[in-house]
């Protein structure tokens, strides 16, 4: 079961980590080649690095620079030749517009460009981006846990596992508990490893809070998914047969409940920080709020396991 659950989770984790590694490994763009020292200070004010050289165009031809400002008979020519990582950079277009704006102002052109400065991608700006990324990962894995635990219950019903277990002397609550633990190990383990790697790559002082909030959210998601089916002896015909209690109904019910808790964390972070799933979205963690959210998640999980055991699903 762990192997079946771990495949999709591993694919998601690998995709996120490869993307993050690519962002970290992306080299800084080479400085802009210019022929006037006055341009260096003006470009530095908008966050663009530059260097004064005798032949800016030659630097581009040699592949040393990918942007240059060339003066020709009192006019200025901007040479832009994107190479390598710069082709995929979301901020490169804005940086090129900033370059043109500075050059137009320097040349006292008849018309100018008004371009907003580049976003802060270092220091506090980077910390904010990392914080948002860690919260998004918590939400993604939480939704994954909801889908997997409901789908696992449907699979156990469809292949006759629930009926077979009903004929054994094993306590009825053991199977929903083991099913939930399998999803917790698969999803929670991947979330834990992914956030640790991301925090190590980008640096984050709040990684412990995000880890705890994410794991609490996964536990709550498993509980919500386990509570989603209703009625004693849940026995619909099939997940796609249009039966009243097919896969779509409990899955949609569980996703709505999970997103409602997440929505509280987004719209009312001061209150959502005390709730499971909401605390993963809110991001404003404290040791006390995480403890309360964890207790609520464990309590909800206990209720879900007991109820699933009584209904034998």
Image (spheres, grey):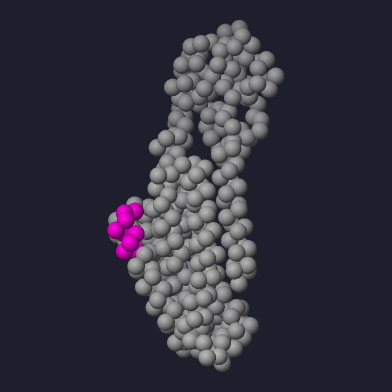
Question: For residue 31, which quarter of the picture?
Answer: top right
Question: In the image, what residue occupies the spot 57% across and 49% down?
Answer: 17
Please say whether residue 97 is visible from this viewpoint: yes
Where residue 230 sits in the image (x, y, percent)?
Answer: 46, 83
Q: Main secondary structure of the magenta part?
A: helix
The stretch in magenta equals: 285-293
Where residue 104 sits in the image (x, y, percent)?
Answer: 51, 18
The residue most toward the front is 169
In the rendered view, would you say 238 is above or below 276? below
The residue most toward the right is 62
Number of numbered markers: 0
**Magenta stretch: includes residue 89:** no
Question: For residue 10, which quarter of the picture?
Answer: bottom right
Front-lying residue, 198 or 251: 198
Please say whether residue 76 is visible from this viewpoint: no
**Magenta stretch: includes residue 291:** yes
Front-lying residue, 141 or 253: 141
In the rendered view, would you say 164 is above or below 195? below
Quadrant occupied by the N terminus: bottom right
Question: In the image, what residue occupies the spot 55% across and 64% down?
Answer: 186
Where residue 5 sits in the image (x, y, percent)?
Answer: 59, 67
In the rendered view, would you say 14 is above or below 30? below
Question: For residue 257, which quarter of the picture?
Answer: bottom left
Question: In the image, what residue occupies the spot 65% across and 17% down?
Answer: 59
Question: In the image, what residue occupies the spot 36% across and 65% down?
Answer: 294
In the rendered view, would you say 240 is above or below 86? below
């Amino acid at each position: 079961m762990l192997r079946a659950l771990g495949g999709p989770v591993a694919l998601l984790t690998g995709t996120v980590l490869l993307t993050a590694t690519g962002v970290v490994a992306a080299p800084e763009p080479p400085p802009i080649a210019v022929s006037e020292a006055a341009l260096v200070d003006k470009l530095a004010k908008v966050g663009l690095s530059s260097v004064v050289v005798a032949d800016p165009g030659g630097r581009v031809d040699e592949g040393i620079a990918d942007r240059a400002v060339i003066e020709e008979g009192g006019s200025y020519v901007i040479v832009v030749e994107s190479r390598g990582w710069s082709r995929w950079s979301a901020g490169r277009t804005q940086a090129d517009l900033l370059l043109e704006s500075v050059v137009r102002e320097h040349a006292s052109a008849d018309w100018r460009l008004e371009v907003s400065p580049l976003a802060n991608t270092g220091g506090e700006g980077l910390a904010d981006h990392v914080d948002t990324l860690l919260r998004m990962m918590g939400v993604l894995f939480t939704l994954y846990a909801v889908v997997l635990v409901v789908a696992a219950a449907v699979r156990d019903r469809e292949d006759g596992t629930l009926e077979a277990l009903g004929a054994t002397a094993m306590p009825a609550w053991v199977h929903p508990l083991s099913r939930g633990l399998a999803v917790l190990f698969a999803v929670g383990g991947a979330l834990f490893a992914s956030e640790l790697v991301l925090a190590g790559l980008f640096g984050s002082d709040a990684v412990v809070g995000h880890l705890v909030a994410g794991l609490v959210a996964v536990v709550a998601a498993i509980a919500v998914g386990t509570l989603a089916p209703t009625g004693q002896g849940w026995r619909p015909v099939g997940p796609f047969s249009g039966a009243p209690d097919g896969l779509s109904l409990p899955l949609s019910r569980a996703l709505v409940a999970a997103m409602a808790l997440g929505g509280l964390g987004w719209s009312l972070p001061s209150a959502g920080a005390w709730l499971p799933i909401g605390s993963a979205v809110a991001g404003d963690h404290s040791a006390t709020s995480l403890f309360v959210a964890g207790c609520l998640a464990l309590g909800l999980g206990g209720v879900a396991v007991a109820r699933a055991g009584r209904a034998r699903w």
